[in-house]
């Protein structure tokens, strides 16, 4: 029994077992699926930022509402009125930070999707959105603490 091997059609033309696709077709499928996974990851990240922004804004509204009820229950208490004024400032700062974070997340998402559509790789910025929000949140917290302790 003298068997001769089947002739090879060259590199890249090997059939994947049981699929009927050549190596190039499989590579294109993998690339398409990888791109799809990147888009889904971008969506998940943007949704997380939307939740974060919504949480900050909600906490800001809650802060104002809590101290408003405190002032309504004890109108003669000047300390409660002072806390309410501070809560309004802190609540507005958190509300604006939530809005800014959501808008920046949307811009970042749109930019990354545009780059993917043009066949370019999404870029990672040097100054990340999470770092920006963390710095701003720290500044708001420190300012609130300063005004709470000095007045």
Image (cartoon, helix red, strand yellow):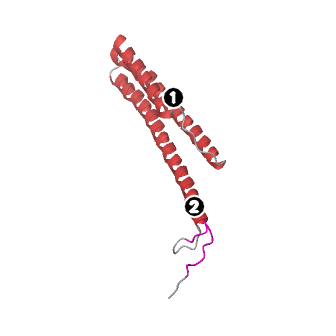
**What is the total number of numbered labels drawn onto the structure image?**
2
Q: In which quadrant is the C terminus drawn?
A: top left
The tag earlier along the polypeptide, 1 or 2, is 2
Neighbor class of circle 2 (other Cα within 10 Å; few <14, some 14-19, many 20+) is few
Looking at this view, name the residue that lies furthest to the front: 2
Looking at this view, name the residue that lies furthest to the bottom: 1
Q: Given this view, does label 1 or label 2 mark the residue nearer the observer?
A: 2
Q: Position of residue 42 (x, y in %)?
A: 53, 46
- Position of residue 24 relative to residue 149, above or below, is below
List the residue tagged with mark 2: 27
Look at the image and tell me whether residue 151 can be seen. no
Neighbor class of circle 1 (other Cα within 10 Å; few <14, some 14-19, many 20+) is some
| Range covered by the magenta-colored residues | 4-15
Residue at image position (54%, 34%) is 125
Q: Position of residue 57 (x, y in %)?
A: 46, 33
Please identify the quarter of the rendering in which residue 91 is found: top left
List the residue tagged with mark 1: 96
Q: Position of residue 87 (x, y in %)?
A: 41, 23
Image check: 65 left or right of 49? Answer: left
- Position of residue 140 relative to residue 119, above or below, is above
Q: Secondary structure at mark 1?
A: helix
Q: Is residue 141 magenta?
A: no
Q: Mark 1 and mark 2: span between their CA atoms?
A: 46 Å
């Amino acid at each position: 029994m003298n068997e001769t091997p089947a002739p090879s059609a060259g590199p890249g033309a090997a059939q994947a077992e049981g699929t009927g696709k050549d190596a190039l077709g499989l590579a294109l499928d993998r690339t398409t699926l990888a791109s799809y996974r990147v888009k889904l990851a971008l969506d998940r990240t943007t949704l997380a930022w939307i939740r974060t922004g919504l949480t900050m804004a909600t906490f800001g509204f809650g802060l104002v509402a809590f101290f408003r009820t405190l002032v309504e229950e004890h109108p003669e208490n000047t300390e409660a009125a002072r806390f309410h004024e501070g809560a309004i400032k802190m609540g507005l700062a958190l509300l604006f930070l939530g809005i800014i974070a959501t808008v920046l997340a949307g811009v970042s998402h749109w930019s990354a999707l545009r780059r993917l559509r043009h066949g370019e790789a999404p870029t990672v910025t040097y100054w990340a959105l999470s770092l920006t929000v963390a710095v701003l949140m720290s500044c708001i917290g420190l300012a609130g603490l300063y005004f709470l302790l000095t007045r």
